[in-house]
Amino acid sequence: MSLIEDLNWRHAVKAYDPSKKVSQEDLYTILEAARLAPTSSGLQPFRIVVVENQELKEKMVQGALNPEVMRDSSHVLVFAAWDSYSNEKIDKVYDHHTDVRDLPQGRFNSYTDMLKKIYGAQTPAEHFAHTARQTYISLGLAMAQAAELKIDSTPAEGFSNDVVDEILNLKELGLKSVSLLYLGYRDAEKDWLSTMKKVRVPMEEFIIKK
């Protein structure tokens, strides 16, 4: 199937079958698509926490708008962004770039010095606003890959960030949760949205030509 067909197939599932689990192979493929997402300056300023443990999911449902969806999904992917930029983080990323490309460390110093100057003039709140936005590109690619594999998904912002951050100890990792992606297989009888037509703004209204 083409990407367009895959996207027409998928929808935000409203009920999952808790007895059906995503295989580790398929999960890896989805995570790899997310990992390969482009990010500003190639910094990848976020991480994905994979939650499969049912006890953790039961704790995380506190404050969730759709607790049953979270509880019954096979996996919960937590997209968590850096809480701030730092010179050390930038250097670590670009040291890795030079190592992988077999280049001398410091090869990109002029560029990283510019980044450090830009982010050094900003507040941690401005940093997080920027890192959080980067996660959505990865989220979109994860959903597209899941659709190709015919694995259902539901993106979610309706949850308690404080609860999730505390349960997963994200603060200690210098991270803050941004969004969730539930993965699994729909319960056709309970997923009321599965029988409805997909609705989007018409193309002629959606696209504005100048």
Image: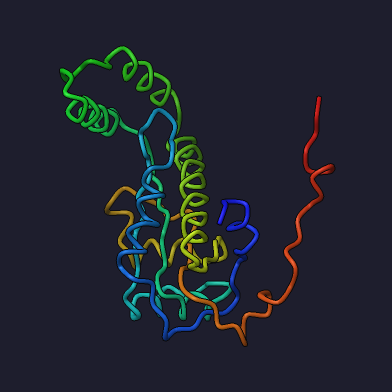
Give the farthest residue toward the right: 204
Q: Residue at x 42, y 86 (%)?
A: 19
Q: Residue at x 50, y 66 (%)?
A: 150
Q: Residue at x 42, y 37 (%)?
A: 124
Question: Is residue 172 placed above or below 153 in the rendered structure?
Answer: above
The picture places residue 94, in percent across and down from the top left corner, at 26, 27
Q: Residue at x 26, y 32 (%)?
A: 93
The picture places residue 155, in percent across and down from the top left corner, at 54, 61
Q: Nearer the viewer, residue 149 or 24?
A: 149
Q: Nearer the viewer, residue 55 or 123?
A: 55
The picture places residue 168, in percent across and down from the top left corner, at 32, 64
Left or right, 70 with reference to 28: right
Question: Is residue 22 placed above or below 123 in the rendered structure?
Answer: below
Question: Is residue 134 placed above or below 100 in the rendered structure?
Answer: below
The picture places residue 206, in percent across and down from the top left corner, at 78, 43
Picture colour scheme: rainbow
Question: Is residue 14 placed above or below 10 in the rendered structure?
Answer: below
Q: Nearer the viewer, residue 194 or 119?
A: 194
Left or right, 104 with reference to 170: left
In the rendered image, the quadrant that contains the C terminus is top right
Give the farthest residue toward the front: 1
Left or right, 201 with reference to 136: right
Q: Nearer the viewer, residue 92 or 127?
A: 92
Task: Give the number of marks.
Answer: 0
In the rendered image, the quadrant that contains the N terminus is bottom right
Within the image, what quadrant is residue 122 found in?
A: top left
